[in-house]
Amino acid sequence: MTRDEKPKARLPRGFVDRHPADIKLADEMIGKIKQVYELYGFEPVETPLIEYTDALGKFLPDQDRPNEGVFSLQDDDEQWMSLRYDLTAPLARYVAENFDKLPKPYRSYRVGYVFRNEKPGPGRFRQFMQFDADTVGAPTVAADAEICMMAADCMEALGIPRGQYVIRVNNRKVLDGIMEAIGIGGDDNAGRRLTVLRAIDKLDKFGPEGVRLLLGAGRMDESGDFTKGAGLDEAQIAVVIGFVGAGSVDADLTIANLRPLVAASATGTAGVDELAEIAALVRAAGYDDGRVRIDPSVVRGLEYYTGPVYEAELLFEAVNDDGQKVRFGSVGGGGRYDGLVSRFRGEPVPATGFSVGVSRLAAALKALGKVEAGAGYGPVVVLVMDKAEAARYQAMVARLRAAGIRAEMYLGGSGMKAQVKYADKRNSPCVIIQGSNERDAGEVQIKDLIEGARLAKGISSNEEWRESRPAQITVPEADLVAAVRDILARYPGA
RNA sequence: GCACUCGUAGCUCAGUUGGUUAGAGCGUCGGAUUGUGGCUCCGAAGGUCGGUGGUUCGAGUCCACCCGAGUGUACCA
């Protein structure tokens, strides 16, 4: 098969290019989150994008092939490697590999891209950025409580006002207890429990009625596609629905509601005890004012969590480009994963952590108007009026740069009009003009493009526009730097 | 994966019951303006009508299959 056609310049599905404004926003967000994590005593570590697939634990069950959800490739020695799909599994590998060197508990944070090979959707990409903090080797729920409070601090550091977000906390042991209570504990009901958990997880999407359908016979979606339910009977459904609705703004009340529901289950009771302990720690620190809340409907990650689970949710709605209301929902989450490091080692290694979805949060912050969308000003552009004088223009650029002013000489091949347009597109604050007239007089002209654009609104005739040369000054060449500095001073950030 | 909807210029879209050479607006580039962003005017570039096959004297239009996209749903470590 030959490839005589030109390749199409196109982005792979589910991936995005980032523009200067996006990069600036993400960098600022990362800086703010980093400050919070460091304030709490976490330290950075970086692991590669690729791990051996078995270290990630993503081989298909009973097969010698990686899970389809991860991007995988085979090394020249036939070993399977995969792009990381989260930052937790690589951390577990890192900790297990460096166990003796690391202080325990080990408090670490990591930021970077992760990859998921699944169908992209609005706000869902195959490459996105996460920013995690984890505590490894801390068995008590004090570590979990701390991470919840730190998550709340992150939200506020990012400019999300108190009351417009909530960190919701639940415990997998309580969920397990409920399963036991309705008689679907035990190995032979594992599949059914999964269906029930998934149904609970859909509460914010479908509401209580939708969950009720999914717990029973099943649910038909808008396109007519049918989702098979868990097949619970009315009594079982009532217990689950009651459990999901047991949450209250008052943590004591929530816990009192939960206790009788799992009274018959030792696991469930242990889970409620843990929630009570977290609630007490949260209250002692003053975070029980709506920032951190016990909520039985949080399910979160169906596989490796073993205890407390948490989710950061945005509570406000925004309007997207098409005028539709959008709820951002979950922008981060985490929980306790006591089994993940011990997978590599004989001994148990408790761990808990939290992950911020930077990419999704960035979209939310834009909608909230918390960040300006612009990419800022461009450099000062020195126009090339006379190609033979390039050295002279380059010398001006050097003077500006030596003074700490971002500047460049126009390097294209077009005429003056195109050069000014170029500077305009770069959002340059001003351009430097020196033709033969100015050169002979030992002068330069400086055109303030921002002020010029403002003045242009009052000019309608082409002659006037050209003759008046709005916002343009002439200064001795020796005063170039000082004059540019004066103009830049008018525009903060230029 | 399943279901529904949709593919015409870079973007948004027209295109008559199937009928000559497939159009418009916006954007891009050039000119009017030897050396000035905007406005205005003039001009140009840009399309295998998603692909393949079929029906027909004739297909952007009708049919089949394929590919791609969007939305919902499933999965989501």
Image: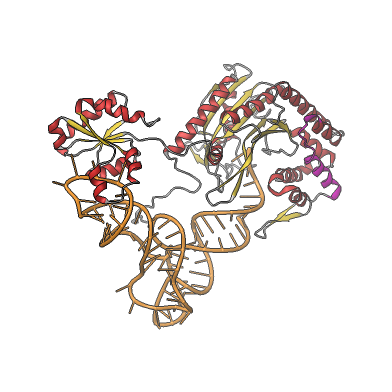
Q: Is residue A43 above or below residue A53?
A: above
Q: Quadrant of the C terminus of chain A?
A: top left
Count numbered badges in the picture: 0
Depth check: give the residue in front, A136 or A73.
A136
Q: Residue at x 82, y 42 (%)?
A: A242
Q: Is residue A198 above or below residue A291?
A: below
Question: Toward which corner of the image does residue A248 lie, by quadrant?
Answer: top right
User: Is A447 contained in the magenta span?
Assistant: no
Q: Position of residue A347 (x, y in %)?
A: 68, 22
Q: Position of residue A299 (x, y in %)?
A: 71, 38
Q: How is the image coloured?
A: secondary structure
Q: Residue at x 49, y 49 (%)?
A: A13
Is B18 left or right of A369, judged from the image as shown?
left
Question: Toward which corner of the image does residue A106 lie, by quadrant?
Answer: top right
Q: Position of residue A483 (x, y in %)?
A: 27, 28
Magenta part of the chain: A233-252
Is B60 left or right of A430, judged from the image as shown?
right
Q: Position of residue A270 (x, y in %)?
A: 80, 28
Question: Toward which corner of the image does residue A422 lie, by quadrant?
Answer: top left
Q: Quadrant of the N terminus of chain A?
A: bottom left
Q: Residue at x 70, y 46 (%)?
A: A202
The reply to whether residue A305 is visible in this rendering is no
The reply to whether residue A150 is visible in this rendering is yes
Most prominent secondary structure in the magenta stretch?
Answer: helix
User: Is A236 contained in the magenta span?
Assistant: yes
Q: Is residue A143 above or below residue B77?
A: above
Depth check: give the residue in front, A67 or A483.
A483
Is A264 left or right of A391, judged from the image as shown?
right
Residue lying farthest left? A440
